[in-house]
Image (cartoon, rainbow, N blue to C red):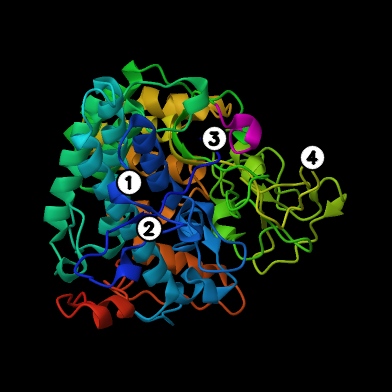
């Protein structure tokens, strides 16, 4: 499925009497001549997946409006030095609803939702002789999963948004906002339906399509955001029963060699040598690694030493050799001064970034076998959901429900993959809820660093203001972060949408 077929789904023109308007299009497929067979349904579903590859979604940008893989630059993990891309200006409070960051993400999400709605309506109507019941269920389950993913991003980042559950004519498109609760309820309903409809796996040729595990993982993530902790436990228990496991090599997981790992519940697939199917979140510049997405000093300092202690208390830490004796996840994620960051060019990182660190995780370090440069679109899949996240979500839910003993083994499993010591060996046994809450939050930060989830975590923990304070304390030249209550947590409705639709009302915070 790497080379997704792009299908443009168009509404048939109506009310036109001119003969030339009745001509069949030579370039587009209309609803009347499509949705006739199982193959049509598959192509229609592929058209929804295609939206995930938009630059502002999961393919990211090297020098343009930031995509979701770059959302760690909202907060204290990374610095968006090209502030015009969106997160940098957002952090310094130099942004308004006209910014492309807000309109581009909004547009992509609703494009995906519109395609999902069309697919759901038409696949449901396919007769039994055109498609098997198992295929119909799997395809509709995928459409529901994808619609939920688009709506989750809208709800998390914009809060109150229009809830559109059917294909629309132009005159029906001017709708008002729904409340967050209404959107949230629909996401949960759709995901629970999709869990029942989706298979546990597909053939190798279909790898990448949403499975039961993907839908359960997305449900767990969204319900964690909603603080519905028992729902998180129920979903993660079902995921564990499906047989996922941690990839043995943390660093390899974020390369093309790790794309088929049993740790992955859902990823967005890309293929480097196919036109318009590549990604740029793994692209980098030649003078320095990923200049617009730089690890922050406070993030680097938060990785422990191999004895499980912070650098402020571990006897293993030496400021003159800060890489030595550190959590292996740091070495897999961050370039230090004098590291070689372009292997084929033998190019050394000189520390020539504002933060003095370079992003390594996910970033290519050489041209492809076919000669495609590191600054051109690549073929790295982006992992949306993985098993380590599931284990940490489950641990956090146990902690928040004050079922503390059950959290140790889950956190230890994630630590153990990187040969970091167990909680009992360092922090001790019989810890309080606050102690374990701090431990799981730290573990999420270092395990999931630079995967676009930090802002999601900071918002739901209510700790975004403290993250801004850490950014300020890092004293990055030209980076004066300004926390604005409310505004720093919620995106505005794009100005272009307000101008086009008089029924939309801006979030009062903006």
- The one nearer the camera, 13 or 427, is 13
**Sequence-wise, which precedes: disc 2 or disc 1?**
2
At x 36%, y 28%, the residue is: 211
Q: CA distance from mark 2 to mark 1?
A: 10 Å
If you read the primary sequence from the N terminus, does the residue marked by circle 2 or circle 4 appear first? 2
For marks 3 and 4, give the CA distance.
Answer: 39 Å
User: Is 418 on the left-hand or right-hand side of 90?
Assistant: right
Which picture quadrant has residue 98? Answer: bottom left
Point out the frontmost of discs 2 and 3.
2
For residue 216, which quarter of the picture?
top left
| 34 is higher (above) or lower (below) than 495 | above
In the displayed structure image, the side of residue 161 where residue 347 appears, left or right: right
Q: Which mark is residue 308?
A: 3
Magenta-drawn stretch contains 255 = yes
The circle drawn on residue 369 is 4
- Tell me which segment is drawn in magenta: 253-260
| Badge nearest the viewer, 2 or 1 | 2
Near-viewer residue (84 or 299): 84
Label 3 crowd (10 A; few <14 / some 14-19 / many >=20): many
Q: Which residue is mark 2?
A: 24
Q: Residue furthest right?
A: 346
Which numbered disc, 3 or 4, marks the residue that appears first in the sequence? 3
Q: What crowding class fits label 1: few (fewer than 14 Cα within 10 Å), some (14-19), or many (20 or more)?
A: few
| Helix, strand or loop at mark 2 | loop
Q: Give coordinates of residue 266: x percent, y percent.
A: 43, 35
Tag 4: Cα neighbours inside 10 Å, few (<14), some, or many (≥20)?
Answer: few
Magenta run includes residue 95:
no
In three-dimensional space, the C-alpha distance between marks 2 and 3, rounded to whole angstroms, equals 67 Å
């Amino acid at each position: 499925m790497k080379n997704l077929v792009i299908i443009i789904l168009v509404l048939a023109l109506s009310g036109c009497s001119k003969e030339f308007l009745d001509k069949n299009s030579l370039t587009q497929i209309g609803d009347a001549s499509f949705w006739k067979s199982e193959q049509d349904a598959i192509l229609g579903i592929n058209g929804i997946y295609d939206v995930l590859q938009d630059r502002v979604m999961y393919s990211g940008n090297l020098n343009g409006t930031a995509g979701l893989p770059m959302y760690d630059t909202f907060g204290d993990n990374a610095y968006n030095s090209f502030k015009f891309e969106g997160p940098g200006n957002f952090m310094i409070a130099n942004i308004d609803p006209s910014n492309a960051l807000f309109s581009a993400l909004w547009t992509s999400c609703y494009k995906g939702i519109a395609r999902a709605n069309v697919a759901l309506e038409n696949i449901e109507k396919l007769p039994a002789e055109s498609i098997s019941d198992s295929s119909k269920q799997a395809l509709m389950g995928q459409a529901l999963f994808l619609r939920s993913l688009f709506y989750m991003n809208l709800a998390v980042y914009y809060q109150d948004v229009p809830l559109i559950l059917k294909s629309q004519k132009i005159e029906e498109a001017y709708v008002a906002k729904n409340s967050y609760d209404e959107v949230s309820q629909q996401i949960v309903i759709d995901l629970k339906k999709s869990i029942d409809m989706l298979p546990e796996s597909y053939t190798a040729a279909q790898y990448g399509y949403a499975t039961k595990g993907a839908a359960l993982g997305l449900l767990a993530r969204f319900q964690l955001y909603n603080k519905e902790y028992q729902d998180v436990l129920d979903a993660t228990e079902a995921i564990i029963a499906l047989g996922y496991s941690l990839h043995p090599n943390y660093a390899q997981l974020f390369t093309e060699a790790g794309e088929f790992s049993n740790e992955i519940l859902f990823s967005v697939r890309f293929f480097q040598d196919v036109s318009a199917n590549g990604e740029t979140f793994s692209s980098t510049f030649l003078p320095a690694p990923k200049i617009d997405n730089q690890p922050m000093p406070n993030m680097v300092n938060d990785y422990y030493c191999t004895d499980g202690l912070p650098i402020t208390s571990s006897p293993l830490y030496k400021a003159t050799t800060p890489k030595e004796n550190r959590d292996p996840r740091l070495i897999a994620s961050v370039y230090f001064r004098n590291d070689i960051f372009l292997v084929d060019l033998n190019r050394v990182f000189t520390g020539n970034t504002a933060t003095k660190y370079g992003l390594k995780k996910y970033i290519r370090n050489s041209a492809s076998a076919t000669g495609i440069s590191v600054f051109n679109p690549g073929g790295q899949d982006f992992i949306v959901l993985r098993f380590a996240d599931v284990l940490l979500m489950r641990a956090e839910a146990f902690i928040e429900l004050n079922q503390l003993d059950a959290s140790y083994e889950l956190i230890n499993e994630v630590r153990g993959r990187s040969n970091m010591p167990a909680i009992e060996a360092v922090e001790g046994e019989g810890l309080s809820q606050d102690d374990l809450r701090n431990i799981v939050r730290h573990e999420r930060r270092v395990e999931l660093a630079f995967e676009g989830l930090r802002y999601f975590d900071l918002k739901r923990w209510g700790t975004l203001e403290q993250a801004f304070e850490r950014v300020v304390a890092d004293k990055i030249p030209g980076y004066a972060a300004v926390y604005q209550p409310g505004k720093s947590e919620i995106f505005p409705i794009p100005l272009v949408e307000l101008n086009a639709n008089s029924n939309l009302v801006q979030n009062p915070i903006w």
